[in-house]
Image (cartoon, rainbow, N blue to C red):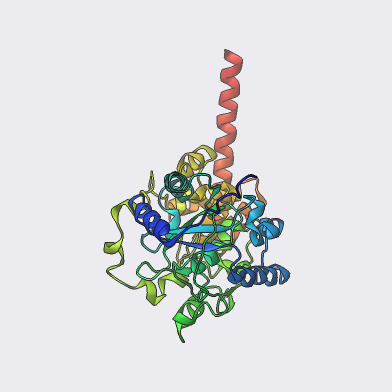
Amino acid sequence: MSEAPVELVLTAALLAGLAEYAETVGLLRLGAVGLDHPGFAAAGAALDRFLGAGKAGDMDFLARTRDVRRDPARMLPGARSVLVAAVPYTGESGPVARYARGLDYHTVVHQRLIALERRLHAELPGVGTLICVDTKPLLERSAGALAGLGFLGKHGCLIVPGLGSYVLLGAILCTARCPEPASRRLERPWDACGSCTRCLDACPTSAFDGPGDLDPRRCISYLTIEHRGPVPDDLAARMGERIAGCDVCQEVCPYNASAERDRRVPAAAWIGPAPRPIPDLEDMAAISPSQYRAHVRHMALRRIPRRHMRRNALLALGNRSGEPGPRELFALALGLLDADDQVVAAARRAAVRRAALEPALALCEQLRARLLAEAAARAADDDAS
């Protein structure tokens, strides 16, 4: 008679050892939660309401992966739990959100999770695992809260005590069982926010319908990163000079106000700096295909197609005041000459708002003449050779 298979369990002692190791490779506050936790049912129901209200906008992948998000075992057969860790980031307010200014976090966090996965396999032979960074369809913020890393704030981000909400999440699905306390819940996830509504009140585009209830179709992060159509002018006017994401709701959060926060983060946890500086708006609005490919290489910004980045930069130029300088005027003229309708529309909007449509069109004619002359010279050289 064959013996029954031994059940694999993420014991408290094992998790404590894994958490200690995880910190050495830059994964902080490691926790775990069973996939049968009732909190996941609440998160799945919230996803259904979100999709039912049409709030996904252009993010069709959310509907396509709904069933997998509600049942991660579809990604890893036999999955019973998930380990979650936080990776902090830092930076200053600017046109590009803080998380997107360094090395591509997908690659960095994935490499760290590989190291943790190897340790888990050594400690628990035979366990099945699957690494998940945010391209995998996992309800990771809910998993982070249920795993004990922190709580969901009214802005919908996971707030990790001592680290705030400026954190990225990495997870490992595994086939081991995870006993966890029953007290962790998601029914009222923002109790720790109290009566504070700073994040809701500060949103430039009024994208929140209530605590934890974001309508991405009005969110600057969605509009600059995910949205593939024209940006409505009433929203574009409130985007300011943001071209890739937005940090406003996190910038006003009291949990992100600690001056001690960065000093508490181990050096190994920080994601490396960007391989190259972010171009200014004028350069980004006029950036060539080869320049853009070179710039976004190894950065999370590569999620945004060049045409949409140029659209964003031109909208931002239009939100400035005063007469445009020579470099701005050149970017507007290039936009007006572009073959892409969205780029042209954004350039025209900017030129009109800056009272510079006539000089921009005049420069267009000069650029056309120069291009025609250069083409004629190349043709003459070809004929001579």
Residue 66: image quadrant is bottom right
The residue furthest top is 385
The residue furthest right is 52
Q: Where is residue 276 in the image (x, y as percent from the top left)?
A: 38, 44
User: Which of the pair 349/241 is nearer the observer?
Assistant: 241
User: Which of the pair 281/209 is nearer the observer?
Assistant: 209
User: Which of the pair 260/1 is nearer the observer?
Assistant: 1
Q: Is residue 330 visible?
A: no
Q: In this view, does 48 lie to the left or right of 240?
A: right
Q: Position of residue 219 (x, y in %)?
A: 57, 68
In the picture, the quarter occupied by the C terminus is top right
Q: Position of residue 74 (x, y in %)?
A: 67, 53
Q: Where is residue 77 in the image (x, y as percent from the top left)?
A: 64, 50
Residue at image coords 56%, 25%: 377
Residue at image coords 28%, 70%: 259
User: Which of the pair 177/170 is nearer the observer?
Assistant: 177
Q: Is residue 93 left or right of residue 56?
A: left
In the displayed structure, 381 sits above or below 209; it is above
Q: Can residue 14 be seen in this view?
A: yes
Number of callouts: 0
In the picture, the quarter occupied by the N terminus is top right
The residue furthest front is 1
In the displayed structure, 179 sits above or below 373; it is below
